[in-house]
Amino acid sequence: MIDRYARKTLALALATALALAVVSQAQVAADMPGGVVAETLRGVSTVEKIDANTREVTLKREDGSLVTIVAGEEVRNFAQIRVGDIVEVEVTESLAIALEPAYTQVRERRDEYSCYRAKLGDKPGMKTTHTVEAVATVEAIDPKAREVTVKGAKQTVVLKAGEGVDLSTIKKGDNVHAVYEESVSIQVRAPGK
């Protein structure tokens, strides 16, 4: 079984290779206590060439450029891919932050992974989701720039606070709660379907 980090790396490499001419949609919900930011990138390409021996697939992007990727053994149903098939990629990232005191004073982090692969006999497809839930400590607040620096169990990051967040209720040393989710979906379908 492939390691989950390798799966994510493969999925992101494929997504990056395909998503040259992508449509980006960003949403911000400032009415949340801290806010929610989400961004979705979408890309479409067409299968131009397949080498079954090396498992190389050459894809034509929307801008006409070509990219060749190697579909590893973890790509189920490789034999179902045909020249002319459409490959759709969607990458979504979202971050929800509750800039209010957390119920614990211990910095912690919880990672959760899920993966879906196409059923045997179907066209290849997969979706991976990585969710990180963390409690972090406020290290600094810049009210003018509306930025809050928080230190979690593994790293320190600067977060942009939504307009609906009252930064005067947050102080250095407070613990805050955040949830980050990244989802990568890759689907192969026959043209016209």
Image (cartoon, helix red, strand yellow):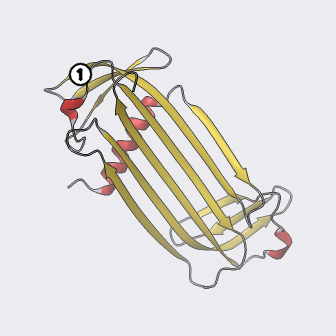
- In the figure, 91 relative to 2: above or below? above
Q: How many marks?
A: 1
Seen as rendered, the residue at the extreme front is 193
Residue 188: x %, y % from top left: 34, 32
Q: Is residue 176 left or right of residue 120?
A: right
The image quadrant of residue 49 is top left
For the point 21% across and 37% down, the residue is 77
Pick the quarter of the image with the N terminus: bottom left
| In front of the other: 137 or 48 | 48
For the point 29% across and 37% down, the residue is 124
- The kind of residue tagged 1 is Ile
Pick the quarter of the image with the C terminus: top left
Q: Is residue 113 left or right of residue 131?
A: left
For the point 56% across and 78% down, the residue is 107
> What residue is shown with label 1?
50
Residue 187: x %, y % from top left: 37, 37
